[in-house]
Image: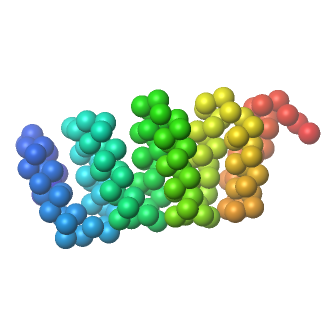
């Protein structure tokens, strides 16, 4: 129903429908994703951030919601807030490859290769996977370290 309202240009009605759905089903990740998508398209950055904050409170194991929150903060230029969000994501998802790799990417993209390297070392212990090991090798190659 929210999608139909949005398609007709009734954004406030779509928000109301989603708010009701979230009141009834507060732990449903799919509804939070839809609410966040609506705010990303039609809301303000502050409204999107508030929606994402509530989403991770109700669905702390939903990695995608944490990653969306961190990415939005990073895109707004608040790297420290993105780092704090990822720390909270780690607390809720200790063995999440996706969260580890997002933290590595954040550091690498912000010219912090030593922080990225340290995170990958922890990731190899906490969430070892072929992808984590591959990212470790790629980081070393990109940074010119071949030892």
Q: How is the image coloured?
A: rainbow
- Asked if 142 appears above or below 136 in the picture, the reply is above
Examine the rendering and report whether any part of residue 46 can be seen: yes
- Asked if 71 appears above or below 95 in the picture, the reply is above
In the image, 46 versus 28, the foreground residue is 46
- Residue 10 position in % (x across, y down): 8, 43
The quadrant of the image that shows the C terminus is: top right
In the image, 120 versus 136, the foreground residue is 120
Q: Residue at x 62, y 49 (%)?
A: 101
Q: Residue at x 44, y 38 (%)?
A: 73
- Residue 69 position in % (x across, y down): 42, 46
> Quarter of the image holding residue 93?
bottom right
- Residue 33 position in % (x across, y down): 32, 54
Side of 79 relative to 76 (left or right): right
> Quarter of the image holding residue 17?
bottom left
Q: Residue at x 25, y 52 (%)?
A: 35
- Residue 136 position in % (x across, y down): 75, 46
Side of 65 relative to 33 (left or right): right
- Which residue sits furthest right? 147
In the image, 47 versus 5, the foreground residue is 47
Side of 75 relative to 37 (left or right): right
**How many numbered marks appear?**
0
Side of 44 relative to 139 (left or right): left
Examine the rendering and report whether any part of residue 41 can be seen: no
The quadrant of the image that shows the N terminus is: bottom left
């Amino acid at each position: 129903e929210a999608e139909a309202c949005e398609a007709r240009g009734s954004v406030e009605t779509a928000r109301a429908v989603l708010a009701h759905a979230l009141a009834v089903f507060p732990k449903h990740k799919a509804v939070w994703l839809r609410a966040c998508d609506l705010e990303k398209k039609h809301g303000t950055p502050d409204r999107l951030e508030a929606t994402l904050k509530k989403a991770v409170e109700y669905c702390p194991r939903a990695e995608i919601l944490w990653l969306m929150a961190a990415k939005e903060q990073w895109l707004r230029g608040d790297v420290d807030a993105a780092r704090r969000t990822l720390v909270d994501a780690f607390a809720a998802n200790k063995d999440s490859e996706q969260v580890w790799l997002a933290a590595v990417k954040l550091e690498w993209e912000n010219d912090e290769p030593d922080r990225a390297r340290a995170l990958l070392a922890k990731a190899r212990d906490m969430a070892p996977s072929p992808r984590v090991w591959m990212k470790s090798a790629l980081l070393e190659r990109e940074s010119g370290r071949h030892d």
